[in-house]
Image (spheres, rainbow, N blue to C red):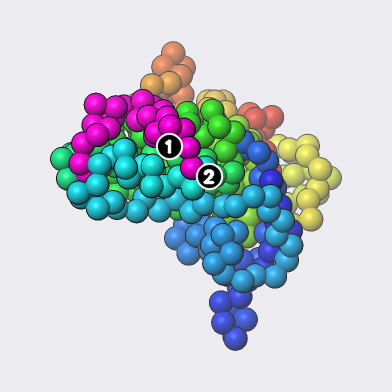
Amino acid sequence: MLELKNIKMVFDSRGIAGIHGIDLSLKPGEVISILGPNGSGKTTLLRIIHREIQASGDLSLDGQTHFFKMTEPLDDVSVQDFLISKINDFSDDEKKTQLARDLADLFEFTSQFRHKIHQLSAGQRQKILVAAELIQRPKILLMDEPFSHMDPISRDEILRSLFKYIRRHNMSVLWVTHDREEAFKYSDRIGIMNFGKWEQIGVPADIIRLPRTLFAAQFLGYKNFLSVKYDQGWITPWGILDLPAGEKSEAILVMPESWSETSDGPEFLVLRTYPSASGIFCDFEGLDRIFTALFPIDQLPDFKKPLTLTPNLRRSFLIAW
């Protein structure tokens, strides 16, 4: 469907790179979301795929891409005529009308189907604009935060209908978003970009549980990092972590739920505690760093005194520093 191999792009004659050797394979019916900070290259990558920007490398594309833009219609046009005007595939008026009605049913604006655009509320207009972007059923849909201006309730309602339609018609999607929760909810794979390259790309479960780089882990909100050195094993304040040596300097990421109170080991000063649905979070300081632990309600230590804590090293893992 879509294959990118070693895609590179420089912004100007000084050789400042915008995209650094990106590889990507998008399968039919697959949804990939792209996360990353502003300026990381997310939008640039979409524009390269849409052939708005020239880049080096191999770009293989089966079918046309459609950039999701939600173009405003004229106010004196009916909803039905606006949607039908977006269909270019065939001339059968009955088929065109049925396509439009199918989307009206999905996005729940059937009762406004023959209304003029100016008679609609802002929320109804948003649904119709989204439906107009889908009615051509493009093979590959490129989305660059098209819903960032919507309120959370409308956004969630539209996203549920949008991805229902996408799955029903086996459309492939590349989706730039800053909303991590939505990305994990709707995506088959997630890519995290930084400075024009992938920090990590994979299925949501691997991304959230096994971040591979320090940037990816921090971007996802993890805090518990500790630099380590290798000497017949990774040396930590709590013993040796028996994992293979890596080529780069490494860090240990300690999961919040892996901490427990012990009788010996480093002492930590409690900074604050705060509740969650699964227990009590505790931020504590020691070893020149601030860590976070999650304690079950039935296993709470005495937060009024310094804590002697040890992580379960089997539930910790290495990431590139």
Between circles 1 and 2, the one closer to the viewer is 1
86, 155: nearer the viewer = 86
> Picture coordinates of residue 153 (x, y %)?
28, 33
Q: In this view, does 279 lie to the left or right of 196?
A: left
Of helix, strand and loop, which one carries label 1? helix
Callout 1–callout 2 Cβ contact below 8 Å: no
Q: Which residue is drawn at 24% across and 34% down?
A: 114
> Picture coordinates of residue 303 (x, y %)?
38, 28
Of helix, strand and loop, which one carries label 2? loop
Q: State whether the magenta stretch is mostly helix, strand or loop.
A: helix
Q: In this view, does 161 lie above or below 143?
A: above
Magenta-colored span: 91-117
Residue 33 visible in the current orientation = no
Q: Mark 1, residues whose alpha carbon is within 10 Å: few (<14), some, or many (≥20)? A: few
Q: What residue type is labelled 2?
A: Asp
Q: Is residue 82 above or below residue 161?
A: below
> Picture coordinates of residue 234 (x, y %)?
74, 44
Q: Mark 2 points at which residue?
A: 89
Q: Residue at x 61, y 75 (%)?
A: 10
Q: Mark 1 points at which residue?
A: 93
Does the magenta-highlighted stretch encompass residue 131?
no
Q: Which residue is drawn at 78% across and 51% down?
A: 246
Outermost left residue:
119
